[in-house]
Image (cartoon, grey):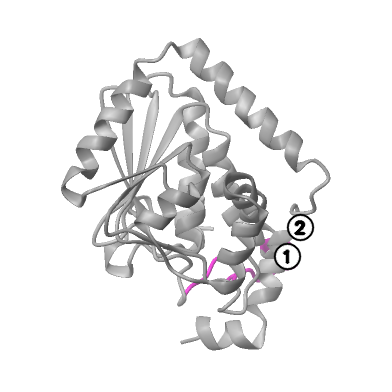
Amino acid sequence: MPTRRDLLDVVQHDSTLHVWLNRPEARNALDGAMLDEIAALFSSLQTRFDVKVVVLGGRGPLFCAGADRRNPPGRGGRTERERRWEAQVGRRAIEAIQDCDVLTIARVHGHAIGGGAALALACDFRVGSEDSRIRIPEVELGMPLAWGVLPRLISEIGMARARELVLLCGEVPAARAEQLALLHRVVPADELDNTIDEIAAQLADRPEYAVAATKSQFRAYAQARRMGEFDEGDGELWINGLASDRAREVFDQ
């Protein structure tokens, strides 16, 4: 799949790397190329020893509107092999964030919808402005929640709340998102960047070995909890969902 390097705006300040989703004209909607860029960038951080913290944000009025309805991930494969590869593009991006050895912070403002919520959920910390909203509308759009997101959501907020969010597809305002642990902290919009800078500075100041070991412990615990779960093939569920009647109505607009 061809890549477009302008899809991410990357700026480094000291040991903190700021990664911006950079499609504000499309509300930072996720297509296959952007997800590939996210996967490649976060995977590359395994050998970027000058980076201790990554802040993931979105340019423009909102964090991310989810999958690009005009060009959804997984739509473009011409051969079976291409389709199977594209079916996992979202999973690769999510796993690259989750498996990153450096600490990650999601900077959430405006809306984080569907795949956008999934990107935020993959980060170690999620800080949102008071005007932020989180919504997971996949089922309403005729799609299953794929990309390995459901186990992560259940692990973070519990089975009952995950079921409510995924099946009712309701919008979660910032204060409620903080109560559910979808967001770790909520602050006024004009304090968002300063708050994130303070958290990033605190995290960057932590001893490297302790941070790396602790991240490994959290990752091992999460993997142990997921043993026996059948989400490896949910990329196929995404592809099949795109072919459903309801999804064709939505994504072919």
Residue 58 in percent (x, y) is at: 31, 53
Numbered mark located on residue 233 in the image = 2
Q: For mark 1, does the 10 Å Cα neighbourhood hold few (<14), some (14 to 19), or many (20 or more) residues?
A: some
- The amino acid beneath tag 2 is Gly
Q: Residue 65 falls in which quadrant of the image?
A: bottom left
Q: Looking at the image, do the residues carrying marks 1 and 2 touch, with CB atoms under 8 Å apart?
A: yes
Side (left or right) of 121 relative to 20: right
Q: Residue at x 74, y 42 (%)?
A: 226
Q: For the magenta stretch, what is the residue range?
A: 71-82
Q: Residue at x 32, y 28 (%)?
A: 200
Q: Is residue 16 above or below residue 120?
A: above
Q: Is residue 241 above or below residue 194?
A: below
User: Can you see residue 185?
Assistant: yes
Side (left or right) of 241 relative to 196: right
Q: Residue at x 61, y 54 (%)?
A: 149
Residue extending farthest to the left is 190
